[in-house]
Image (cartoon, helix red, strand yellow):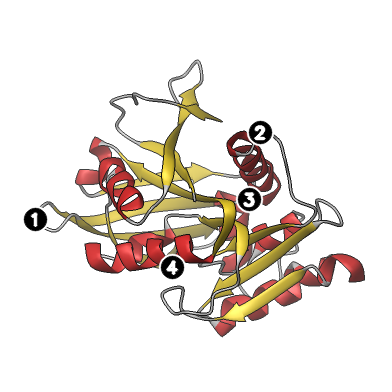
């Protein structure tokens, strides 16, 4: 993504540049779907991105080819409008017709049916009550087509149980992931994203997240309760420095890391 630094600070641009890789995401989603279905794709492969925000993944999905249809679901007009202007507008007319957007609560009935549903960037962590998370998973299960696949991501590790802030430097700005607080009684945590462009003051709390830290076993249990089967965990490998290498493979056992990221998938 090419940066065009306008006088106004574009927090969505810097978020995308810091934490998103939609082209890699869609390849991973496609791979997981095919692994569950023996590489047998339907004539139309419909993906739904819940909590889609600026729906960059949905747009990337539509770019895969004629049979790839994307639905983006979110509650915020602002983020959907941003995606229309900055991502959807970059697609061809034919690709744009394969992108469908809906301003809707993911807990409500009437969600678009799909072959593949994803909820990424830990977005479902906003559901702090187990019954509410279960209701969301039930809604996903109900709206998946036969042989449909559900994919979410999850993070954790000992570093997530104490306040800390981590800086990642980019060419012309820094990204800060700030865990401000953690409550071990509720497993609730408060997180912020800050940015600092070169030569400028740090911009505090560009994004904030009031989340419950769900564990992998909790998520797997709820998925099973609502009817999902073949629940799998895709664990990230490590590079020579001990950091995540961005390669995710199925795993029965994880690693005791200070910080880890994984994907959890299941089939209807």
Q: CA distance from mark 1 to mark 4?
A: 28 Å
Q: Is residue 56 left or right of residue 223?
A: right
**SS at circle 1:** loop
**SS at circle 3:** loop
**SS at circle 2:** loop
Q: Is residue 66 left or right of residue 124?
A: right
In this rendering, the label closer to the viewer, 3 or 1:
1
Q: Is residue 160 above or below residue 13?
A: above
Say whether disc 1 or disc 4 marks the residue closer to the N-terminus.
Answer: 4
Most foreground residue, 116 or 25: 116
Other-residue count near label 3 (Cα within 10 Å), few / some / many at <14 / 14–19 / ≥20: few
**SS at circle 4:** helix
User: Residue drawn 58% across and 62% down?
Assistant: 49
Question: Does the rendering let one see residue 7?
Answer: no
Other-residue count near label 4 (Cα within 10 Å), few / some / many at <14 / 14–19 / ≥20: some
Q: Are marks 2 and 4 in contact (CB under 8 Å)?
A: no
Most foreground residue, 127 or 78: 127
Q: Which residue is mark 3?
A: 172
Q: Which residue is mark 4?
A: 139
Q: Which residue is mark 2?
A: 38
Residue 199 disc label = none
Other-residue count near label 2 (Cα within 10 Å), few / some / many at <14 / 14–19 / ≥20: few
Other-residue count near label 1 (Cα within 10 Å), few / some / many at <14 / 14–19 / ≥20: few
In this rendering, the label closer to the viewer, 1 or 4:
4
Q: Position of residue 235 (x, y in %)?
A: 44, 31
Q: Is residue 86 left or right of residue 18?
A: right
């Amino acid at each position: 993504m090419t940066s065009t630094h306008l006088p106004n600070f574009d927090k969505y641009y810097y978020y995308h540049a810091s934490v998103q890789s939609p082209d890699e995401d869609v390849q991973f989603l496609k791979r997981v779907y095919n692994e569950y279905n023996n590489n047998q794709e339907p004539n139309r492969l419909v993906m739904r991105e819940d909590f889609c925000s600026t729906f960059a993944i949905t747009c990337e999905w539509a770019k895969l080819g004629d049979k790839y249809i994307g639905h983006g679901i979110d509650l915020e007009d602002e983020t959907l409008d941003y995606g229309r202007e900055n991502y959807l507008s970059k697609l061809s007319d034919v690709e744009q017709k394969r992108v469908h957007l809906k301003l809707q609560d993911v807990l409500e009935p009437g969600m678009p049916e799909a072959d593949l549903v994803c909820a990424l960037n830990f977005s479902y962590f906003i559901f702090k009550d187990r019954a509410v998370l279960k209701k969301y998973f039930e809604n996903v299960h109900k709206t998946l087509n036969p042989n449909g696949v559900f994919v979410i991501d999850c993070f954790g590790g000992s570093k997530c149980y104490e306040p800390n802030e981590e800086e990642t430097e980019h060419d012309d700005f820094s990204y800060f992931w700030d865990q401000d607080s953690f409550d071990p009684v509720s497993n609730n945590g408060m997180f912020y994203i800050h940015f600092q462009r070169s030569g400028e003051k740090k911009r505090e709390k560009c994004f904030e997240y009031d989340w419950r830290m769900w564990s992998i076993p909790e998520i797997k249990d709820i998925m099973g309760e609502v009817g999902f089967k073949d629940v799998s965990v895709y664990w990230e490998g490590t590079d020579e420095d001990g950091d995540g290498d961005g390669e995710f493979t199925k795993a029965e056992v994880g690693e005791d890391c200070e910080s880890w990221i994984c994907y959890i998938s299941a089939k209807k």
